[in-house]
Amino acid sequence: MTSTRQAPSAPVRVRLDRRATDLPELMDDPDCDLEQLRLTYERFDVVNRLVSGWRRTWRRHVVPLAVEAAGAGRSLRLLDVGSGGGDVPRAFARWAARSGLPVDVTAVDPDARAHAFATGRPTGGVTFRAASSADLVAEGARFDVVTSNHVLHHLDDAGRTAVLADSERLAERLVLHGDLERSRLAYAAWWAGTLPVRRSFLRTDGLRSIRRSWTAAELRGVVPSGWRVERQRPCRLLLVHEVPGGAPC
């Protein structure tokens, strides 16, 4: 078993001038404590509601395509990659239902632990699969929109390149990858805001996630042509790819 190490005693002691790519997150360890992992998945729902910014991204980027699809008499097909505990794709399905928009949400994660957690509770209208983006490419699957939340900073360079390439193959209209923006403000806010948190990886891994993440300039320097980086509040980046000449929904 892997035990959680104590987070830094003060945020000012941590270097944030470069990515800490050699700093692993505890939840990525296949031998991590499963109870702490479960508690971490449970708390992601609250965390993402507060800081992920997906509601405004949904309204700005996804709703117009869903309206277009509905006008053509069909559902928008949305894929969420690396869905973890499943709270973000469930939110997508919930927002679509509330607005009366037909959206079919599929969520994939190759981690059996994440899939077990996500399918161990009501699916909320989401189709969950234990699969990777590469698996779907191999199947010839296609979607209108491909999304991910806090996935990219977990990957090494080869993994990131592969997921972006898979996203381009899977998406007919739009790709949206949301992630954290590394900054002193983000680190200090998470350090202070999670002081009361116990018995999960949320505090330690959140701090490590920030240290593993990019600044906007850094991310722009590593993404392929045809992708753009949008800064969002609070301390977030949205990586966007609009498919040139994408077929109408």
Image (cartoon, rainbow, N blue to C red):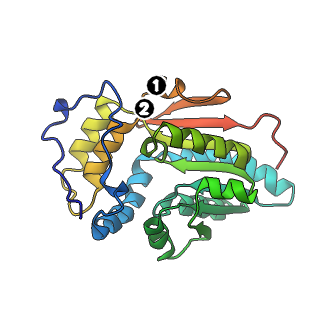
Which residue is depicted at the point 68% across and 29% down?
A: 226
- Which residue is the extreme one toward the left? 9
> In the structure shown, which secondary structural element does the residue marked by tag 1 occupy?
helix
State left or right for residue 233 relative to residue 72. Answer: left
Residue 197's quadrant in the figure?
A: bottom left
Q: In this view, does 77 lie above or below 62?
A: below
Q: Can residue 100 be seen in this view?
A: no
- Which residue is the extreme one toward the right? 72
State left or right for residue 45 relative to residue 11. Answer: right
Q: Can residue 178 be seen in this view?
A: yes
Badge 1 is on which residue?
218
Q: How dense is the environment of label 1, judged by Cα within 10 Å: few (below 14), some, or many (20 and up)?
A: few
Residue 229: assigned label: none
Which amino acid, mark 1?
A: Glu
State left or right for residue 61 relative to residue 151. Answer: right
Quadrant the N terminus occupies: bottom left
Badge 2 is on which residue?
214
Q: Position of residue 147 (x, y in %)?
A: 60, 49
Which amino acid, mark 2?
A: Trp
Q: In this view, does 119 lie above or below 23?
A: below
Which residue is depicted at the point 62% across and 69% down?
A: 127
Q: How dense is the environment of label 2, judged by Cα within 10 Å: few (below 14), some, or many (20 and up)?
A: many
Which residue is depicted at the point 81% across and 40% down?
A: 246
- Could you say which is closer to the camera, residue 186 or residue 58? 186
